[in-house]
Amino acid sequence: MPIKKLENPRIYRQIADQLKTLIESKEFPPGSRLPAERELASQLQVSRASVREALIALEVIGLVDVRVGNGVIVCHPPASAVIPSKEPVMSQAGRNQWADVDDELNIELDFTAELPPFSLLQTRRLIEPETAALAARHATDEELAAIRLAYEQNCRDNRQGSATHPGDRLFHIRIAQASGNPAYAFIIAHLLGHRYGTMFRSLQMHYTPQDMPHRSEIEHLEILTALEARDGRAAKKAMKDHLDAVIKIFGQG
């Protein structure tokens, strides 16, 4: 069976891209069945949930027909895919999810709204220790290198007296991206992928002690050291301690 074991858990994306390549190279021709979920999970040494996500992604772009209880049938390629595409499956399958709010919910979502600073920090405090723990286990060498580069940018920003702290924000985004969980990566990138809002900047201006950039560097280095040591427990604790320290500083009278 021309399927390779996956060593790094970017799981469902890797599974989908591997199966897409095999389908387009006619290893699995139109009309044939893919191996069963259980068999794929066993060969790839991944969970059935990851396999199922990959198969659904392939169905969304028209490469397979998922027939529950009757296997997964390879489809004739859609007209737009006669020439095999090198674009990753998830880039093709995941478009427009955030384009419109579901009108059945009768709610309003404003993705441009400024979040209150402590709400932002408390949300990060819940999510980012877990992203750090996952990144310690799942990050590739390239992702660890990108986290270190962000840390080094953070240090340079501090020397230059930056008010927007791009290296600091990028450090946290790179860790979330290395977690292997695209939902965590999306949330943290959305929260930190913009310059801090007026409320957060005012909070920083009034309540940031002079030594905070230095403290932050030390705390970031502890997180980075744990990540590079592949120590999930230490990475989680270091991230929690860092965010707790930030919240405490901004909350002091």
Image: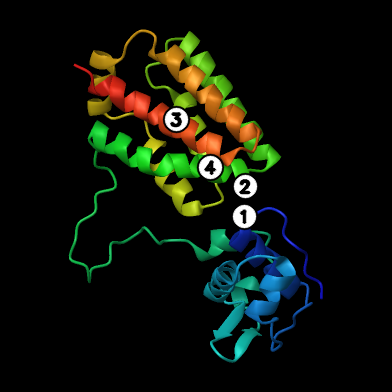
Pick whichever of labels 1 and 4 is earlier in the sequence.
Answer: 1
Relative placement, left or right, of 188 versus 83 is left
Q: Residue type at mark 2?
A: His
Q: Quadrant of residue 196?
A: top left
Tell me the distance, in whole angstroms, between the alpha carbons under discs 3 and 4: 18 Å
Q: Is residue 214 above or below residue 82?
A: above
Q: Residues within 10 Å of mark 1 (few under 14, many from 20)?
A: some
Instruction: Indicate the position of residue 125 as horizontal and vertical percent values.
Output: 36, 38
Q: Disc 4 marks which residue?
A: 133
Q: Identify the disc placed on residue 169.
A: 3
How far is disc 2 from disc 3 in space, using C-alphas?
21 Å
Image quarter (top left, top right, bottom left or bottom right) of the N terminus = bottom right
Pointer 2 or 1: first along the chain: 1
Q: What secondary structure is marked by label 2?
A: helix
- How would you rate the neighbour count of disc 4 (Cα within 10 Å): few for under 14, some for 14-19, many for 20 or more? many
Residue 18: give its label: none
Could you give the CA–CA distance between mark 1 and mark 4, rounded to whole angstroms?
15 Å
247 shown above or below 102: above
Look at discs 3 and 4 and give the one toward the viewer.
Answer: 4
Residue visible at 41% across and 61% down in the picture: 96
Secondary element under disc 3, as helix, strand or loop, is helix
152 and 37: which is toward the camera: 37
Nearer the observer: mark 2 or 1; the answer is 2
Q: In the displayed structure, does residue 232 sit left or right of residue 20?
A: left
Instruction: Report x, y in % for residue 183.
Output: 45, 53
Residue highlighted by disc 1: 10
